């Protein structure tokens, strides 16, 4: 389990991270969403024992990252957002070096390395030099490296950044595989919408503060008090607009004459929404469909990164 | 000892170093330069005398010059080999991953430093056959050679410690290398200058030499001065007659540089995971 209590990191008067309280349960996948500079990498660096928090503490399986960093390192597999590789080191030697760095015996490493390379689909690159691998392959190799000591917890900072669509899909499949293996995964990614289906919960961080935490559905509900309603009518849309304009919860009505639809922002509760529909039917308005516009995590993410205030 | 042999950083560094053609060409050019010098010197000495003899005193002179060249080599190469050990990892973005493994800071620093020292030792040892040519002509005792090599080892260790420490403290490799060369210039050159000034000051206005522990200190930490007393023991007495401090230079040198090396290594170990320090 990962837990942070009042985690704060301050540089001078600037808060990179402010009072972060987070719990990631065992064998779950937690996605971390936020714009660049929001505090994701700072959080990950603290959890990976690379950075000392200014205040608060973080715990990995109950062990404090500040008081017991050496033990924490054995428990986590960390993949940074940017990393380099050694020149003139072959793929299996690269993994062997890190295996040795975790104190794994040579015999065990000999068994582990082929298995890990198979997991990340790099068995055919076993004797190739690491610096000659493609970006996607290096990312996968770095993931294999993070798994060499069989950690229960994986901290993956933008594991799919800079990858082409195919490499992203491959990375996503590997992460899915790791989830089925029961790993606890904390992941940040710009492709989180793609990963949303495998995340049990997500946290949205903005300006160093966690502004929302929960399931993907809950987050959307928390962040968006205004939903978008779409109404399709038979005939002219102008016949229904006056009715909706009178509702106090409706704003910014947009017409799409060619599609016979209107859409608007709605601030009311589900009960208000039901009452609005019932009234429209009672007035025999020519409504063909009345639906809530689907917004995915990407919309939420885009809204946050654009600095749009929602909720 | 087992920890030394199984240190992952050391094994990896040695592997990478000897996979690199530059290491071998470096040794090759060093040996060529040394051979040219030795054979050139012997050729000149025998040609000038015209009788084909190479006298023991000439042999000792050759040994002395070679010893100073080797010292110069250590002072010149060690900073380049050690000042980038940690900063280059930082620049290549491999340090963070290394720091999240369960290796201790000491293991990482020790592995990095030992691999550099091992390479320099290999370089020195590879030159031994050429060095030993002087034994053919006499004038040099094996024990003298042995002590000279111990002196090299200590000097190497001290400079390597300074290099690794500066590499840990300074983020950029190029700045770390410049700083380490600066330290070398201070140790080998500035201390000699201070020695001369201190001797002059101590002798000012007095007919008989007065005691000058400061001058003795500068002589103690100056590698070329200590090397001179190892090669020419009478020089030690001469220096003591000037400073009036009856302690052999090599004793002070050994103590000073062991303490300095330990302090540098300790500081490097403490500052390797600097972002995990409380005050940051």
Image (cartoon, coloured by chain):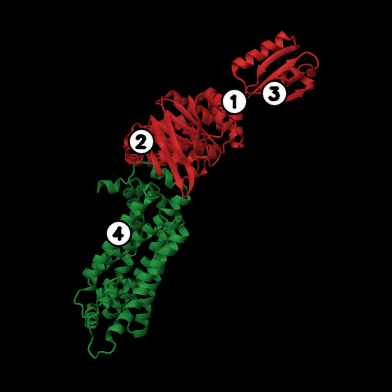
Same-chain status of marks 2 and 3? yes
Same-chain status of marks 1 and 2? yes
State the residue at coordinates (32%, 73%). B224
Is residue A139 at all visible to an observer of this figure?
yes
- The residue beneath circle 1 is A225
- The residue beneath circle 4 is B263
Residue pushed farthest bottom?
Answer: B207
- Distance from Cα at disc 1 to Cα at disc 2: 53 Å
Residue in front for this viewpoint, A25 or B41: A25
- The residue beneath circle 3 is A264
- Distance from Cα at disc 2 to Cα at disc 3: 60 Å
Number of the label disc, if any, that sits on residue A109: 2
Colour red maps to chain: A
Mark 1 vs 2, N-terminal side: 2
Q: Which is in the foreground here, disc 1 or disc 2?
A: 1
- Distance from Cα at disc 4 to Cα at disc 2: 36 Å
Given contact means CB atoms under 8 Å apart, are the residues at marks 1 and 4 in contact? Answer: no
């Amino acid at each position: 389990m990962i837990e942070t209590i009042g985690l704060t990191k301050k540089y001078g008067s600037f808060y990179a991270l402010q009072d972060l309280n987070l719990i990631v349960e065992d064998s779950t996948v937690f996605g971390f969403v936020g714009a660049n500079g929001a505090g994701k990498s700072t959080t990950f660096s603290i959890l990976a024992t690379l950075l000392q928090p200014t205040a608060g503490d973080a715990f990995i399986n109950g062990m404090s990252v500040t008081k017991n960093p050496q033990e924490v390192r054995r428990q986590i597999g960390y993949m940074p957002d940017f990393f380099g590789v050694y020149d003139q080191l072959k793929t299996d030697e690269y993994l062997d070096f890190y295996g040795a760095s975790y104190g794994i015996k040579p015999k065990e490493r000999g068994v582990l390395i082929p298995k890990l390379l198979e997991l990340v689909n790099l068995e055919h690159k076993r004797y190739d030099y690491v610096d000659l691998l493609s970006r996607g392959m290096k990312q996968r190799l770095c993931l294999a490296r993070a798994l060499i000591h069989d950690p229960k917890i994986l901290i993956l900072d933008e594991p799919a950044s800079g990858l082409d669509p195919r490499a992203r899909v491959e990375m996503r499949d590997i992460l899915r595989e790791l989830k089925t293996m029961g790993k606890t995964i904390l992941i940040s990614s710009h492709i989180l919408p793609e990963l949303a289906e495998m995340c049990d919960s997500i946290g949205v961080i903005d300006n160093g503060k966690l502004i929302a935490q929960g399931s993907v559905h809950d987050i959307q509900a928390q962040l968006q008090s205004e939903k978008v309603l779409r109404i399709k009518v038979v005939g002219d849309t102008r016949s229904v607009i006056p009715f909706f304009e009178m509702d106090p919860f409706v704003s910014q009505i947009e017409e799409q004459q060619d599609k016979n639809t209107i859409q608007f922002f709605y601030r009311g509760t589900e009960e208000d929404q039901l009452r609005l529909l019932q009234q429209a039917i009672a007035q025999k308005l020519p409504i063909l469909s009345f639906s809530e516009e689907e917004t995915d995590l990407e919309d939420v993410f885009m809204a946050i990164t654009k600095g749009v205030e929602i909720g | 000892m087992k920890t030394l042999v199984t240190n992952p950083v050391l094994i990896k560094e040695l592997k990478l170093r000897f996979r690199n053609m530059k290491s071998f060409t470096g040794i090759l050019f060093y040996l060529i330069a040394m051979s040219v010098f030795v054979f050139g010197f012997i050729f000149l000495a025998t040609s000038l005398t015209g009788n084909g003899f190479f006298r023991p005193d000439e042999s000792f002179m050759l040994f002395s010059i070679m010893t100073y060249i080797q010292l110069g080599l250590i002072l010149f190469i060690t900073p380049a080999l050690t000042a980038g050990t940690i900063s280059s990892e930082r620049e290549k973005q491999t340090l963070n991953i290394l720091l999240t493994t369960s290796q201790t800071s000491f293991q990482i620093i020790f592995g990095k430093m030992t691999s550099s020292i091992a390479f320099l030792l290999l370089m020195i040892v590879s030159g031994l056959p050429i060095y030993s040519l002087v034994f053919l002509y006499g004038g040099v005792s094996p024990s003298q050679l042995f002590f000279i090599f111990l002196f090299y080892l200590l000097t190497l260790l001290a400079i390597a410690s300074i290099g690794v420490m500066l590499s840990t403290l300074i983020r950029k490799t190029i700045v770390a290398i410049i700083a380490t060369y600066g330290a070398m210039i201070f140790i080998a050159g500035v201390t000699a200058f201070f020695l001369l000034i201190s001797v002059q000051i101590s002798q000012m206005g007095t007919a008989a030499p007065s005691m000058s522990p400061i001058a003795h200190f500068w002589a103690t930490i100056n590698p070329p001065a200590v090397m001179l007393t190892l090669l020419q023991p009478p020089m030690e007495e001469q220096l003591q007659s000037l400073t009036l401090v009856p302690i052999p230079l090599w004793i002070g040198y050994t103590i000073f540089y062991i303490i300095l090396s330990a302090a540098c290594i300790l500081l490097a170990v403490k500052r390797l995971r600097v972002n995990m320090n409380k005050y940051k």
